[in-house]
Amino acid sequence: MRSSNKQAALSYAEKGWKVFPVTPCFKTPLAALAPNGHKDATSDKITIDQWWTERPNANIGLYLAASGLVCVDVDSYKEGCAFDNLRRTHEFPQTLMQKSARGGTHFIFATPKSAEFPGRLGFGVDVKYNGYILLAPSTFDAGSYSWINDLTPADAPGWLPKGKPNTLKGRVHKAPTQTQAFEPRSSLDVSQLRNEAAQGVDWHNNVLRLVGHQVAHGYTDLEIHKTTDSLTLIDYTIEQTRCEVQRMIDGARIKGFDGQPAANLQQAPLPFFDLHNDNRGNPICNHSNLVKLLTMHPDWRGAFATDEFSGKRKVLQAIPHHHNNNDIFQPRQLEDEDYTRVSMWLNDNRMMHTAKDIVVGAVAKACSEQSFNVVKDYLERCQLIGKGNDQLLDHWMLQFLGVEPVNEKQKLYVKAVSRLSLIQAVARVFKPGCKADSVIMLEGKQGTGKSACLSVLFSPDYFGDQLPQMTSKDASSYLRGKWCIELAELEYKRKTEIETIKAFISRTQEDYRPAFGREEIIQPRTCVFWGTTNKDDYLNDETGNRRFLPIKTNAIDLEGLRKSRDAIWGAAVSAYLSGEAYWLSGNLSEIAADEAKGRMEQDPWCELILANMSGMGEASIRDAFMKCFNDDDENRTTSENRRMSKALILCGWERAGKFTSGDRRNQVMFVNPSPTEGGSEQDNHFDF
C-alpha cells in the first residue's frame, strides 16, 4: 500500500527540507493552502500536519534552494537526451536519486544556499535550484514518483555551479575568418605553433596555420598527419584529430596553397565536378548532383554515415554553416538543421532553388553510402585477443563478481549463465532481432557496484539504466543504440505488471512511430536485459520465471573486469561463431528453476498448506480453504481464490485439469506430487 502523503511530508521535514502542498495529480502549487507557491514551503511539522490533514492527497513540493539542495533533472526518455555525454565528460558522484512520474531521474545534491547554477546542461538535462520538484509518493500524468535509493545527498560536483567551465561540448575557440584560417605565412614560428597546440592553447587556429604552412611547402597528406597526430589532446582520439586535420588540408589545397591554380569560387563555385546544369550553366538541385557533392566534395566527403548498430544516421565531421565548425568535432546524430546547412551551402554555390525533399533524400543516400557498426567492429577485434581464453568465459562471474557457489550443482549453473549471458549479447550484435530473452539478475547489497560492472562490461556509450515505462513508445525509442539495458530493482506485484514485463523483454523488434516522424520504424533489437536488486524475494510469477537467471554477487572487482573485458568478449565471440547455444536446457533448466523458486515472494498461506495438507494427494481450492481455515464459504472473491491457487503452486502442487465427478465436479484439480505418508482418505476428500 502506498504510504500516506502526510507521513512522507513529515519525514522530509525531519531532514530539514522545506515542503509545501501541490495540487493532486498536477505540478501547480495548491493555492488554497500555499498562495505564494514554493515561497510558502516550510519544515514546521504543525503546519505540514494541518496542510495534509485538510488535503491528504496533495502532492509534495520541495523548495530546493531553501533546503540547501540542487537537482539535476534528467529526461532520459527523450530522444537525443544529452545525459550520456554528460556522464562521459564529468565526474558524477553517487547521490540521492528519485524516479520521476514520466520515467526520468532526479539526481539530488547538497549545496550552499548562496550557490548559483545554470538552467540547462544539454537537451533533456536541466538543473533545478531556485524552483521546486515533486517528491515521492506524488503523482503526475498517470505515473508516480518513487525513490531509487535512500543515500544522503552528496555535495554538488565542482563543475556544476555557474562560473565553472562547462566542457560538455568540448573546447570552444573563437572562429577565425576564412582569410585568417588559411593564410600561409612564411614568418610563422612553427615550433611555437606546435608547442601551443600540444598544450591545448587555441588548438584549432594554431593547427590550422601549421597545416596551411606545410601545404604551402609541399608536404603530403601523410606527412602532415604524422606531424599533427602528436598534437592530439586528452579526451580525443587520433581518428578525431585526423578527421579535423583532413578538412584543413582539403581546404588549403582548394585555395591553392600548394602552388596549383586555385579555383575562382565566384566564377566556378563547384569546379571539377561533372554536374547537371540548367540553360544558364548553373547546377541544378537534383538528387544526382547533390549525392555527388555530398559524397565527393571536400566540404562534405565522409561527413554523413549510417550507424548500423543503432540504425541512426550520423554526422562524423564538422560541416559548413555549423556553429562548432572550427572546434574539434564530436560525431553526433543527424539533426533537422543539417538539411538547412546543406541548403545554405548550396545557395552559397549558386544553387539558389533548393527543395527540402530533394535535400533530405540526398542526405539519406549519402548516409547509406557509408556505414559502420562500432560494436561489431569492437567485438571482431576482441576475437583476436580472446583466442585461447575460453576458460575465462566460464569463470568471469566467479572471478570478478565475487560469486560463491555453495555446491557443484550451483557451480555448473553459474558457469552456464556466465557463458550464455555474454554469448546472447554477441548474438544480438551479429544478428539483431534474434531470440535472446534471458535476464540475468545480479543480486547483492546496495552500493557494491552491480550497475557499475554492467557499465564497464558493455561500455557507458551503449549501456542504459533509465528505461522509461515499458508501455510507452519512449521505451522503444530508448532502446535504439543500446547494447545492455539495466532493469534496476526489478519488482512487480500485479498480474498486469508481470505480463507487461514478460511481453516487453521477449520482443525481438520495436515497431513504433517516433514523435513527428513520417513513417513507422521497425528496428530489430540489439540489446539484452540485465536486472539488479538487493532483495531475495523479487519474483512473483509462478509461471514466467524461466527468463530470470539469479546470480548472487559479493565483492565486485571493477578494475579487474575492466582490464579483462576485451579478452572476455573475445571468448564470447568465438563461442558464438562456433554455434554454441545461448539458452539453458536439460538439467541446467531444472537447476535454474530451483534458483528462481528460491527468489519467489512467499505467502503466509504456504505455511498453513504445508502444515495441514501435506498428506493429501489431490484437492480443489475449496478443499484448501476448508482444510486451512475451516472455511466453506462459496462466495469467496476471485482474488482470494487466485491467491490460494498461487500458494498451492508455491508449495509444489500442480494443476491437473478438473474434477470430473462428485461434489467437486468442474472444479480445478491440484495434485501433490509428493504427499507425506500417513495421509488418510479424509485428507483427500471432504463431505460437504
Image (spheres, rainbow, N blue to C red):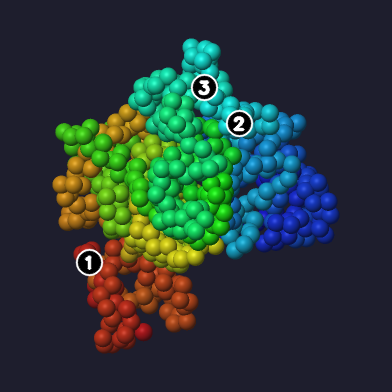
| Distance (Cα) linking label 1 and label 2 | 84 Å
Q: Which mark is residue 673?
A: 1
Is the Cβ of the residue at disc 1 closer than 8 Å to that at disc 2?
A: no
User: How far across and how far down the image is residue 659, in percent?
Assistant: 27, 82
Q: Residue at x 42, y 79 (%)?
A: 632
The quadrant where residue 181 appears: top right
Q: Nearer the viewer, mark 1 or mark 2?
A: 2
Q: Nearer the viewer, mark 1 or mark 3?
A: 3
Q: Which mark is residue 177?
A: 2
Q: Is residue 327 left or right of residue 575?
A: right
| Distance (Cα) linking label 2 and label 3 | 14 Å
Which residue is label 3 attached to? 184
Q: Tag 2, which secondary structure?
A: loop
Q: Residue at x 63, y 59 (%)?
A: 139
User: How far across and how far down the image is residue 557, in percent?
Assistant: 36, 30
Q: Amino acid at mark 1?
A: Pro
Q: Name which of mark 1 and mark 2 comes first in the sequence.
A: 2
Q: Residue at x 55, y 41 (%)?
A: 266
